[in-house]
Amino acid sequence: TRMLHHGRHWRSMCKGLVLGTLLTSFMLLLYSYAILPLQVGVTDIPASSSCSPHPATDKAPAAANITGSPSAPSCLPKLNIMFMKTHKTASSTILNILFRFGEKHRLKFAFPNGRNDFYYPSFFERRPVADYPPGPFVTVLRDPAYLFESSFHYFGPVIPLTWKLTGEDKMAQFLQDPWRYYDPNGFNAHYLQNLLFFDLGYDNSLAADSPLVEEHIREIDGRFHLLNARKGSTVSRLTPELYEKATAWNLIDAKLYRYFNATFWRKVEAYGRERMAKDVAELRRENEKMRSICIDGGHAVDASAIQESSMQPWQPLGEKSLLGYKHQKLCRKMLTPEIQYLTDLGVNLWITKLWSRVRDFLKW
């Protein structure tokens, strides 16, 4: 009996070794297929770029240099840019713009290896980028109540803390008594409270009245050149009561947002409200023109309706809410989702791709 037991034990060990070897070989094979030749861009000498003129100089003649010929425009595009991606703020749209801008000017990109993020959800650390060439640091903020609503529904399937919610409106149930369900140490719990503060590299579980909150907001103000406060949600089911509850629950983010929203509008005043309105109107006209050219039907469609799988947007486990676009070939770059664009730029996303294949295999 003992000999039989030992024989079974050894057979089990051998099976485990064989399976482990096969799995390792499979992973290495996937890794080798995932590696793409790295496309390293070289920054061109910046070409002159038109700027939106100040109303006072809109019709003024070009200044002459000492030779009598018109001087070159004083505005050049900013080429050294650090973009801090935040979640559920339309930052993927900004990324697409920056990717196209970088390709146009043949700039170098700093990307992670193997995946599409730098060890997120670890806290953002400023030290790795502190010594990069000087340039504007930019990011995007959003009204915390609307951000919480979007984050709760989008990331809910991968936040175990929300699985115990059983009502039809899980978010409303959560906001009635958040501390009944919330644990700051829970897996992916950072998606449920003060997500902006977390994304910017700070402790999102601080007490809202802690002196550190104001100190960190001043630090952010000193480091970032532009924080675009995104306009409120155009599609929201928040009642006024739930809006207040969501704001109170994300009070640190609310303080952050109010501070930089006020800062943003002070900059608009300095730039000129009429001048800004003129720029926005022109941008909307150009966007509408490209929409009519690039998008079949002129509007977003469900991701499953996109026949070309390489153009389908990434979605979290079990989530099917994101929209994509049917496109004409001319507009591919403008409509390419973030993950696919990273691949086009030569980023090795073997971990991200492996996870995507696992999800597809499981038919999530």
Image (tube, rainbow, N blue to C red):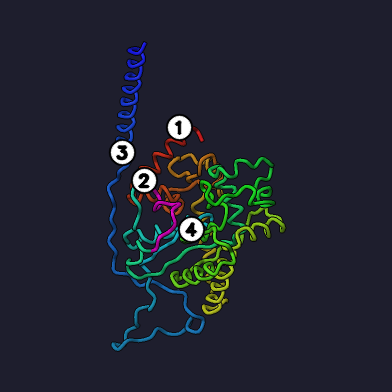
Question: Mark 2 is on which residue type?
Answer: Leu
Residue that numbered label 1 is attached to: 361
The quarter of the picture where the N terminus appears is top left
Side of 11 relative to 204 (left or right) = left
**Residue 229: image x %, image y %?**
55, 66
Question: Mark 4 is on which residue type?
Answer: Asp
Inspect the magenta stretch and tell me whether residue 327 lies in it.
no
> Is residue 99 visible in the rendered structure shown here?
yes
Question: Mark 1 is on which residue type?
Answer: Phe
Which mark is first along the chain, 1 or 4?
4
Closer to us: mark 4 or mark 1?
A: 4
Residue at mark 1 to residue at mark 3: CA–CA distance: 18 Å
Q: In front: 102, or 186?
A: 186
Q: Are marks 1 and 2 in contact (CB under 8 Å)?
A: no
**Residue 103: image x %, image y %?**
35, 58
Q: In front: 142, or 235?
A: 142
Q: Are marks 3 and 4 in contact (CB under 8 Å)?
A: no
Which mark is first along the chain, 4 or 3?
3
What residue sits 29% from the left and 69% below the top? 45
Give the magenta range: 114-126
**Residue 34: image x %, image y %?**
32, 41
Residue that numbered label 3 is attached to: 33
Residue at mark 4 to residue at mark 2: CA–CA distance: 22 Å
Residue that numbered label 2 is attached to: 349
Inspect the magenta stretch and tell me whether residue 118 lies in it.
yes
Residue that numbered label 4 is attached to: 199
Residue at mark 2 to residue at mark 3: CA–CA distance: 11 Å
What residue sits 45% from the left and 71% below the top? 225
